[in-house]
Image (cartoon, rainbow, N blue to C red):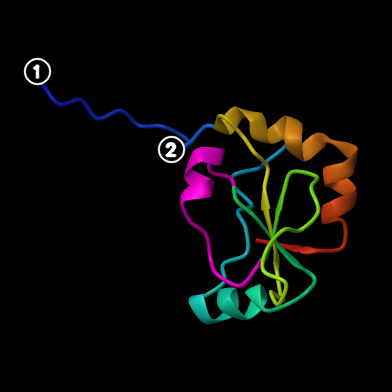
Amino acid sequence: KDLRVLPVKELVHYGLGEGDAPLGRGGTHVDPREFHGALAEEETVVVDVRNHYEAALGRFDGQRRSGAGKVADGPADAVGAEYIDPLMRKSTDFPSWLAKPETVERLRGKKVL
């Protein structure tokens, strides 16, 4: 078979329209030092947008761990960023999780990585 290369707008499709996630604006780039510094902050949350199986395989150490809407269940001495696994089966589950009122409230005023 011949190799085919096709241009795509996104490598992983999350089901968000251009109005919901304008690709032209992009996010804020943080270098590794800033990222790891943010992990130490209590007002930071890390939303793992991989599917639940992949998220269960590994994450950054030291975060308070919680599932979608669950109380933190990480080590008792964990401090810093809260790790959130939205328990997604596929990437297109992300918009519905993000739109839930409890998710909106949970992320309000937080630095989201």
The residue drawn where x is 55% and y is 29% is 90
- For badge 2, the amino acid type reads Leu
Instruction: Kindly give the residue lying farthest to the top in the view shown.
Output: 1
Secondary structure under the numbered disc 1 in the rendered image: loop
Q: Which quadrant would residue 112 be assigned to in this image?
A: bottom right
**Residue 103 point in image, percent of width and height:** 82, 44
The x, y position of residue 47, in whole percent, is 66, 53
Task: In this rendered view, identify the residue nearer to me: 14 or 17.
Answer: 14
Number of marks present in the image shown: 2
According to the image, label 2 marks what residue? 11
Decide which of tag 2 and tag 1 comes sooner along the chain: 1
Please determine whether, in this image, residue 81 is positioned above or below residue 18: below
From the viewer's side, name the closer residue of 75 and 6: 75
Locate the N terminus by quadrant.
top left
Residue situated in front as seen by the camera: 71 or 37: 71
The alpha-carbon separation of the residues under discs 2 and 1 comes to 23 Å
Location of the C terminus (image quadrant): bottom right
Judge whether residue 61 is colored magenta: yes
Question: Hey, which quadrant is residue 68 in on the image?
Answer: top right
Q: Position of residue 16 (x, y in %)?
A: 65, 32
Identify whether 79 is placed above or below 70.
Answer: below
Q: Is residue 2 above or below residue 33?
A: above
For the record, the magenta segment spans: 49-63
Q: Main secondary structure of the magenta part?
A: loop
> Is residue 109 on the magenta stretch?
no
Q: Residue at x 74, y 30 (%)?
A: 96
* Viewer can see residue 45: yes
Where disc 2 sits, the SS reads: loop
The answer to whether residue 44 is left or right of residue 46 is: right
Q: Which mark is residue 47?
A: none
Residue at label 1?
1
Q: Residue at x 78, y 74 (%)?
A: 42
